[in-house]
Amino acid sequence: MTAVGVLALQGDVREHARAVETAGGTWAPVRRPEDLESIDALIIPGGESTTIGKLATIYGLMEPMRRAISGGLPTFGTCAGMIFLAAGVTAGAQAQLGVLDVIVERNAFGRQNESFETNLEIPGFEQPFRAVFIRAPWVAKVGGGVEVIAAVDEHPVMVRQGNILASSFHPELTGDVRIHTMVLQAAAGRRRMDGER
Ligand code: GLN
């Protein structure tokens, strides 16, 4: 059976787990390197990216995650998860995987806009996607192989680079599981490529 791993160090792990289930999939928590071996896709939740980075370092997950994602594991990061996947941040330094060739600005929408919702047009979706932003980053710099899927005021908020998808917003909070369905489809494709385990 196809299983989506949800990085379960900090943040809104349960909400992603529920969204995967609503989309018809099964999920498994990822806390240790060996948990990466039995999953067909990986979700990195929102939360606090510096905390996720610190815990991933302590749990010895940085290199194993880099290897798995670089090896083609379909991966979806939301908000802090997007920051954790990225190559850098516009200010300061923190533990990041660096597998997604973007530089992100944390808390980019400013204090007066700490959280807000908006409808986004996402290619391939007939209806707009209601996107919830909570102290969200935006992508400040996009590398060569990165496709911008959606933007707010011309700031990219959803990007794809090969097997890696990332959003500044939280699709796990609205009950609209179209993006989680995409992750499940990628997981199923990956499983077919690997052969049944
Ligand atoms: N502001 C958080 C950070 O910089 C991200 C917020 C979120 O994931 N909702 O890590």
Image (cartoon, rainbow, N blue to C red):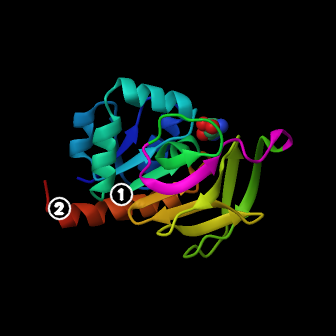
- What are the residue bounds of the magenta stretch? 97-112
Determine which of the numbered discs, if any, sits on residue 74 in the image.
1
Residue 89 against residue 102 in the figure, above or below: above
Whichever of callouts 1 and 2 sits on the residue coming sooner in the sequence is: 1
Residue 90 against residue 196 in the figure, above or below: above
Query: The residue under label 2 is which amino acid type?
Result: Asp
Name the residue tied to disc 2: 194
Res. 140 image quadrant: bottom right
Query: The residue under label 1 is which amino acid type?
Result: Pro
Farthest top residue in view: 58
Q: Residue at x 52, y 40 (%)?
A: 15
Q: Residue at x 53, y 35 (%)?
A: 12
Q: Residue at x 54, y 46 (%)?
A: 88
**Label total for image:** 2
Label 1 neighbour load within 10 Å: few <14, some 14-19, many 20+: many
Q: Rounded to the nearest whole Å, what is the CA distance between mark 1 and mark 2?
A: 13 Å
Badge 1 marks a residue whose secondary structure is loop
